[in-house]
Image (tube, grey):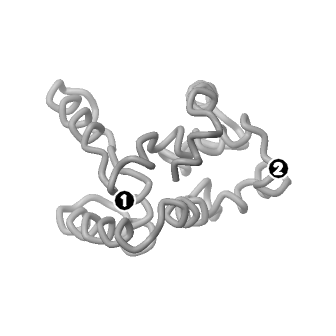
Amino acid sequence: MIAAEDQRFPDHFGFDFVEIQDALEDQDEGKPMRGASTLSQQVAKNLFLWPGRSFIRKGLEVWFTVLLELLWSKQRILEVYLNVAEFGEYTFGVEAASQRFFRKPAARLTADEAARLAAVLPNPLRYRVDRPSAYVLKRQRRIGQQMRQLGDAYLEKL
C-alpha cells in the first residue's frame, strides 16, 4: 500500500508537500485534479470524517492528521489504514479483501496479489480486483515495480 499510495510515508509528518506541490502544478497546467493525500490523511478521513470535498472537511482532516502523527506510531497508522481501507463494495480492510478476492488470509498474499489490491484504491467502487481493467493491470505492474525498488528493508524505517 505504501508503494501505491504514499512512498514518503516513513519520512513525512502526515503531509507530503512534494506531492501537494506537484498536484497544484498539474492543476495549473489544466490537468485533471488529483489527490495528494498521505496514508495518515486517509486514516483521519476514514476514521473521523465524511466523504466528499469541502474546506471544512479538509480543515478537520488536517487537524486529525496532526493528532494521529503525534499520538500514533507509523506502524499503528499503517495498521489502521490497512484495516479500514475500502477495496470494493462492502469490503473494508485488507484481510476482508484478501478473503473475498483471493480466498486466503492477507498474510499469504503474493506480491502480485497485494499489488492488485493496492491498484484499485484510487476508486475501489469503479475499479475491480476480481475483474481488473487494463488500467488496473497496468497500475498493478507499476506498483509491483515500486515494491521491488523499495525493497523489504524499506519497511524497517517505520
Rendered image quadrant of residue 20: top left
| 90 in relation to 117, above or below | below
Residue type, label 2: Arg
Q: Does residue 136 appear anywhere in the picture? A: no
- Residue drawn at (78%, 40%), measured in percent from left and top? 110
Residue located beneath label 1 in the image: 41
**Reading the chain from its start, which is encountered first: label 1 or label 2?**
1
Callout 1 touching callout 2 (CB < 8 Å): no
Decide which of 117, 111 is in the foreground and name it: 111
| Helix, strand or loop at mark 2 | helix
Q: x, y (%) of residue 38?
A: 38, 51
Q: How many marks?
A: 2
Residue type, label 1: Gln
Q: Is residue 71 left or right of residue 146?
A: left
Q: Is residue 100 left or right of residue 1?
A: right
Decide which of 61, 77 is in the foreground and name it: 77
Q: x, y (%) of residue 1?
A: 56, 46
Gap in angstroms between the C-alphas marked 1 and 2: 28 Å
Rendered image quadrant of residue 148: top right
Q: Is residue 6 left or right of residue 65?
A: right
- Residue drawn at (23%, 29%), measured in percent from left and top? 26
Q: x, y (%) of residue 54?
A: 21, 62
Decide which of 122, 89 is in the foreground and name it: 122
- Residue drawn at (72%, 62%), measured in percent from left and top? 96
Q: Residues within 10 Å of mark 1 (few under 14, many from 20)?
A: many
Q: Is residue 67 left or right of residue 142?
A: left
- Residue drawn at (17%, 24%), measured in percent from left and top? 29
Residue located beneath label 2 in the image: 108
Q: Does residue 148 appear anywhere in the picture? A: yes
